[in-house]
Amino acid sequence: MATVTVTKIPHKPKAKRRGKKALNIELGPMDRAKDREAREKLITARVALLIHHPFFGNLATRLTLINADDWLTTAATNGRNFYYNSKFVNALDTKELEFLVGHEVLHVVYDHIGRREDRNAKLSNIAADFAVNGDLVKHRIGRMITKVDCLYDEKYLGWSYEQIYDDLLENSSEMDIDDYLDQMLDEHLKDENMSEAERQQIRDEFREAVLSAAKTETDASKIPEGVRKMIEDLTEPKMNWKQMLPQTLQSAFKSDFTWMRASRRGWHMDAILPGSDREKEIDIALIMDASGSCVSMLQDFLSEVKGIMEQFQSFRIHLLTFDTKVYNHQVFTPDNMHDILDYEVMGGGGTLFEPVYDYLKENDILPEKLVWLTDGMPCNTWGDENYCDTLWIIHSTKIVPPYGTYAFYEEA
């Protein structure tokens, strides 16, 4: 992953921040009286969540409360424990503590550390906080902490962690990042003493806990959209893309009926049945993301398409690639289908879906099926969900699109 050096947005002086240092929290040995007070306040906050937000409350009770006055100034979690600084906790009221507990819970639910991969660690942590705080504010989990600054921007409401990261990577300067780091609410731990097997066990245990906790929440609107999509992904088995693709394309070839040819099936009775018009030409549009993560999929994908379409006598395939623009629109029919494997991918910049829909509409292309091959991380919206039937084949990230059917591309 490239280092963060882009400076498209100039740094603007901001008002003095209410950083963690403003609370005068110093590391040191635990004070038993202060710790007792802090634990009582945290337990009260968890009970309040159990009553008003059962999903969050149930997950919060799975985290063991552990004092960390000697090494931590705010709070943190490793998926099993909730580490806290008693002075920081005692500086917050109950509603703010509900927000803090919810913050740690969502970091575990979304597995932000596990999803980091080779991303820049600082920017990854910032993106994770924007994602979590946005969910908490939107769903009114406690009240956003005001004793110190928290990372929050309405722009990122509904964005995934990966989408926020990409936007920050493209539009933030190093000075912006330093400023964002000062607003981090907690510490993001990656316990080096824990084996990968132990980390995976925590992930698996928490996924089971998420499914159980979701059953206790009577109002689904109180569960963040990202969590709901994750639950759907865990509970609804997804078809392999090589199974989904032929079904999607073949469904566009449902026989239409015409009264121009009589069906022989009706000859033995006093009736004339409609004939089947199997020669109708079907339009299909294949849209391929030009980002680097998808290029390796190209030959595999086009080979599958070629094999499927060779079963039919009449078709028209619109094939194009895109980044923030549309490139190399070509049309393939049975006459030139053998050339499809030589198609050249063009582009390679950012990822915008809207220009594709604009291009299709401007050129009066309304396919029977629209098939996207993408990493599922547009810089803006997912485009026009009402345009036509859509299949998303999404590369490895396990992002769930907001509309259409979908399958995940998995390399053999």
Image (cartoon, rainbow, N blue to C red):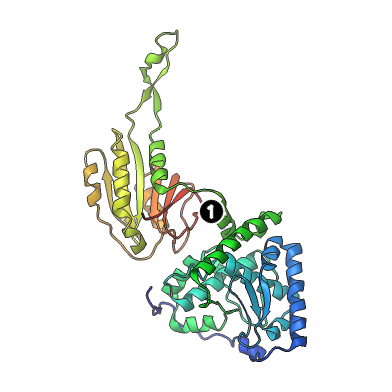
The C terminus - image quarter: bottom left
Give how far across and how far down residue 282 sits, in percent: 35, 37
Q: Which quarter shows the N terminus? A: bottom left
Quarter-wise, where is residue 265 in the image?
A: top left
Percent position of residue 78, x then y: 58, 73
Q: Secondary structure at mark 1?
A: helix
Q: Residue at x 70, y 81 (%)?
A: 89
Residue situated in front as seen by the camera: 327 or 247: 247
Q: Nearer the viewer, residue 356 or 39?
A: 39
The residue carrying mark 1 is 233
Above-or-below relation of 169 to 278? below
Q: Residue 21 vs residue 344: left or right? A: right
State which quadrant residue 135 falls in.
bottom right
**Residue 368 visible, this orientation:** no
The picture places residue 287, in percent across and down from the top left corner, at 36, 51
> At which x and y percent is residue 358?
39, 53
The residue under label 1 is which amino acid type?
Asp
Left or right: 324 in relation to 405: left
Describe residue 285's horizontal placement relative to residue 171 as left or right. left
Q: Residues within 10 Å of mark 1 (few under 14, many from 20)?
A: some
